[in-house]
Amino acid sequence: MIDNTLKILTGSKGTGLLYLVIVFVFFFFLLTRPIVRYLKTLSDGLMSIASGNLDCRVPITSQDELGVIAQNINYMAEQLQLMMQRERQIEISKMELITNVSHDLRTPLTSMIGYLNLMKNDDYQNLEEHKRYVNNTFNKTQQLKKLIDDLFEYTRLTSGAAQLSFRRVDLSGLLEQIMMEFEPIAHEHALKIEKLWEFKQVYGMVDVEKFVRTIDNLLMNALKFSFKPGEIVIMLAEEKDHIYIAVENQGEPISREQELRLFERFYKAEPSRNDYFNSQGSGLGLSIAQNIIELHGGQMGLEYREGWFKFFIKLPRLGNFQVGEWRGKTAQG
Ligand SMILES: Nc1ncnc2c1ncn2[C@@H]1O[C@H](COP(=O)(O)OP(=O)(O)OP(=O)(O)O)[C@@H](O)[C@H]1O
Ligand SMILES: [Mg+2]
């Protein structure tokens, strides 16, 4: 068989055929060389990405199947890069949380140790002073408890572990109830309350306990940070796309940078103010409130203008509310 083939190739007819084979092989290599070279480039690119160089991108030189493979390789590298960035961000965020928590736990604890030490060594002038030390220590334990409770709530909300139970509720009636308890406290602090809402029923789907906590948070902030004497305006309106609730007051002016950071966890715009009321805060209130509203499928924000703070909430109207909007959603950490 092989002998026959050799005979044909070496015969006169065979010489032509031999040339044909040589020409074919020559052109075959000539045409497939760029493809082989490109495959080598893709393979090198993949190896580089696999070894951790996520900035690496392979060149896309055609729109054929190989071009599609190259596009997919680049897409994969981009996605991996995004995933790594997200993980790094979560890691940084966790470290920040630990640093803030350690700092905020240490501050009241240090002063508790200080007072207890004074009392342990009978280092006080009279019973009056002793009582003051006991009171201060007690206040610090309260502050510590609030911080731990808030932290617990915050981590539950942001880890997606919080189970909200939604009910159809008349928000107008609920706000009215909250205001009844709040008004006397506000008056004690020389703050007038103005309610801007039509007294008709406005139904929304809320987790009552969490919603009340959010409103309480806003009202307590208004109480703490308002100029006194002053006024707090509470608004409720049913708009086309959503239910609008807002709490407005006037307080110490803040810069644009502070305005943008108010909803960050642990952020306080006025750390220099250290009267009793303000020093109690951990700066978690607004982050917790915002997470709760987002888990309701709503939005929470601040409209700020020259010392006037308007914290607003937009909740989906009854017809627009979908449990699916919040289920499984985790808020930003
Ligand atoms: N109604 C308001 N008027 C003026 N400033 C406000 C108001 N609400 C919040 N702020 C500013 O935003 C900061 C963050 O508020 P946030 O409720 O998160 O923390 P906090 O009240 O200081 O502490 P916490 O709520 O954890 O007890 C406050 O420290 C304050 O500087
Ligand atoms: Mg607060």
Image: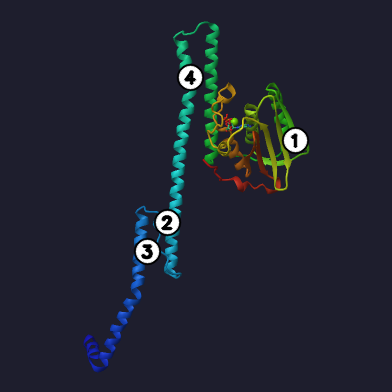
Instruction: Check disc 1 and report the residue beneath it.
Output: 196
The answer, for residue 124, to whether it is visible in the render is: yes
Q: Assess disc 4: are there few (<14), some (14-19) or many (≥20) residues with their C-alpha within 10 Å of its C-alpha.
A: some
Measured as percent of width and height from the top left, residue 120 is found at 45, 11
Of callouts 4 and 1, the N-terminal one: 4
Of callouts 4 and 3, the N-terminal one: 3
| Residue name at image x 37 percent, y 59 percent | 46
| Residue name at image x 44 percent, y 57 percent | 76
The label number, if any, that marks residue 111 in the structure image: 4
Element on which disc 2 rests: helix
Quadrant of the frame with the N terminus? bottom left
Report if the beta carbon of the residue with label 4 is closer than 8 angstroms to ligand 1.
no
Q: In which quarter of the image is residue 66?
A: bottom left
The label number, if any, that marks residue 42 in the structure image: 3
Q: Which residue lies furthest to the bottom in this view?
A: 12
Of callouts 4 and 2, the N-terminal one: 2
Of callouts 2 and 1, the N-terminal one: 2
